[in-house]
Image (cartoon, rainbow, N blue to C red):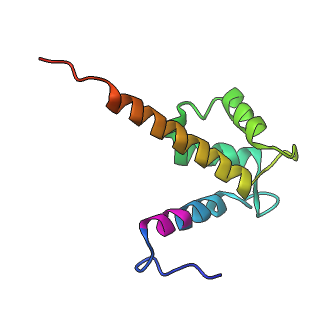
Amino acid sequence: MSLPNSENASTLENAMQLMIQTFHKYSGNEGDKYTLSRAELKEMLTTELGNYLGNAQDKEAVDKVMGDLDSNNDGEVDFTEFIILVGALTVACNDFFLEFNDKPEKKK
């Protein structure tokens, strides 16, 4: 399967390509090139998701995310585990915006 040319790709196809590229931008800097180590995960969380995750610099927060994602307990996050994180954050953001938009506007 080849990736579609981004000029011809749909918005969703471009988003999928971006998730794949982002994962591989950080994976393999140390150790297995198809997984994220704890340090690679921390760098990715800080750089790519800092606005949504808050203090990704906090070691305990990174350890919690790593523990929650690392379903096979191998000390690394593979692409499937990474997609679970992105999916869960996307659901949480959607829920937040739905709740935010459902609040009645205050009259001035």
Q: Where is the N terminus found, in terms of image quarters?
A: bottom right
Q: Residue at (33%, 32%) from the top-left corner? A: 101
Numbered circles on residues, count: 0
Rendered location of residue 100, percent (x, y): 36, 29
Q: Nearer the viewer, residue 18 or 103?
A: 103
Q: Residue at (87%, 43%) from the top-left corner? A: 73
Does the magenta segment cover residue 14?
yes
**Residue 17, above or below 46:** below
Q: What type of secondary structure mainly makes up the magenta span?
A: helix
Q: Nearer the viewer, residue 4 or 36?
A: 4
Q: Residue at (75%, 36%) from the top-left corner? A: 68
Q: Is residue 51 visible?
A: no
**Residue 35, above or below 93:** below
Rendered location of residue 79, percent (x, y): 71, 57
Q: Is residue 64 visible?
A: yes
Rendered location of residue 85, percent (x, y): 64, 45
Q: Where is the C terminus found, in terms of image quarters?
A: top left
**Residue 98, above or below 7:** above
Q: Quick check: 1 left or right of 38?
A: left
Which range is magenta? Answer: 11-16
Q: Residue at (86%, 46%) from the top-left corner? A: 72
Q: Quick check: 46 left or right of 12?
A: right
Does the magenta segment cover residue 76?
no
Question: Which residue in the rendered view is the most extreme toward the left?
Answer: 108
Rendered location of residue 10, percent (x, y): 43, 71
